[in-house]
Amino acid sequence: MRTLDVVRAWGCILAGRAPSMSIEITRQCPLSCPGCYAFKADHLGAAGSLSNVREFQGAQLVAGVLSLVDRHRPLHLSFVGGEPLVRWREITRLLPELESRRIHTQIVTSAVRPIPLEWRNIRRLTLAVSIDGLQPEHDRRRDPATYERVLRNIRGHAVTVHCTVTRQMTRRVGYLREFVSFWVKQPEVRKIWMSLYTPQIGESSPEILPLDVRERVINELSALESVSEKLELPAGLLEAYRRPPEVLTLETKAPVFFDARSTACRTAPEFCSSPARTLGWSLPARGSSGRAKYESRLCDSNGRSRGAGS
Ligand code: SF4
């Protein structure tokens, strides 16, 4: 991040605005990943599940996004889903508009379909492609966005690979090194981000890293730092994974996006449900107020999450 960006972000915060915004641009997704939070019953808080809200398309969606952007004037905007590529036509129309407003846009995708080549002309764009481990594990979890398809669909682009480490990737020594080595070699890959599977409160899942495994993974990731400059693992990030804050309280106002809720971005990577490593919080709705409390979630050795309720 450039100094100018930091100054602009602080200017934005001091003016009472959130520098970062995340929009679930569609609820549609051809994948069915285990642990997907997007379709959980309480994903939108009081509004329930993503399936309960209206889906906007075409000109209405483009106009809606731009009106939100012009109202909140974020510096950084993430499109998440569902699968954002389902709305590739609308995003193709939005990107030049966002670029002209000097907004950095991030699209978090499974790369299940070809990424439009004209997106290469957008300077302030990050394409974050989610890859969940080496081919056997990834293909099992993320079919139809298989390795073969992803490699074909990112051709001609510069992408950031984002991997969430789950329990399955920790059973073999050297797995993470192999993963990084594979993606470092791909010419389309500009950066690699790694994060740790973070369960929802009360979640019980074989994907969760028990505390001792989590510690080992963090040590392994520290040792990988020198593998390639493409692997972005700042010391502060590893430290945040090692010692996440126990309880984090944020003052927020009720978040809104059309009749859905935006994805809350929390102030530590430990809390991010998307690869966006941005500082921000839920979108404030004018005239409304509320208080949200987020807490760190670690797991006990049985793979169950623990943490204070909100
Ligand atoms: S790609 Fe994302 S939205 Fe789709 S099923 Fe997987 S986690 Fe859920």
Image (spheres, grey):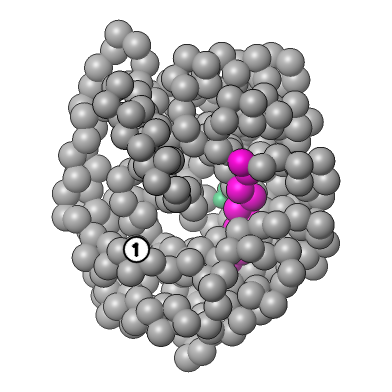
Which residue lies most toward the front here? Answer: 4
Asked whether residue 302 appears in the rendered view, the answer is no
Residue bearing mark 1: 237
* Residue 131 in magenta stretch: yes
| Vertical side of 231 occupied by 181: above or below | below
Q: Dividing the picture into quarters, in which one does residue 16 lie?
A: top left
The region drawn magenta spans 124-132
* Residue 6 in magenta stretch: no
Amino acid on which disc 1 is placed: Leu
Q: Dividing the picture into quarters, in which one does residue 297 lie?
A: bottom left
* Location of the C terminus (image quadrant): top left
Q: Where is residue 29 in the image (x, y as percent from the top left)?
A: 67, 43
| Vertical side of 113 occupied by 208: above or below | below
Q: Residue at x 22, y 35 (%)?
A: 250
Which residue lies most toward the bottom here? Answer: 173
- Cβ of mark 1 under 8 Å from ligand 1: the answer is no
Q: Which residue is drawn at 73% across and 64% down?
A: 188
* Left or right of 20 in this view: 129: right
Q: Which residue is drawn at 43% across and 40% down?
A: 5
Which residue lies most toward the top here? Answer: 287
Asked whether residue 126 appears in the rendered view, the answer is yes
Q: Where is residue 1 in the image (x, y as percent from the top left)?
A: 45, 50
SS class of the residue under badge 1? helix
Q: Dividing the picture into quarters, in which one does residue 103 lie?
A: top right
* Left or right of 199 in this view: 78: right
Q: Is the magenta stretch mostly helix, strand or loop?
A: strand
Q: How many marks?
A: 1
Q: Which residue is drawn at 76% across and 42% down?
A: 121
In the image, 269 versus 164, the foreground residue is 269
| Vertical side of 207 occupied by 63: above or below | above
Q: Position of residue 286 (x, y in %)?
A: 34, 11
In the image, 193 versus 118, the foreground residue is 118
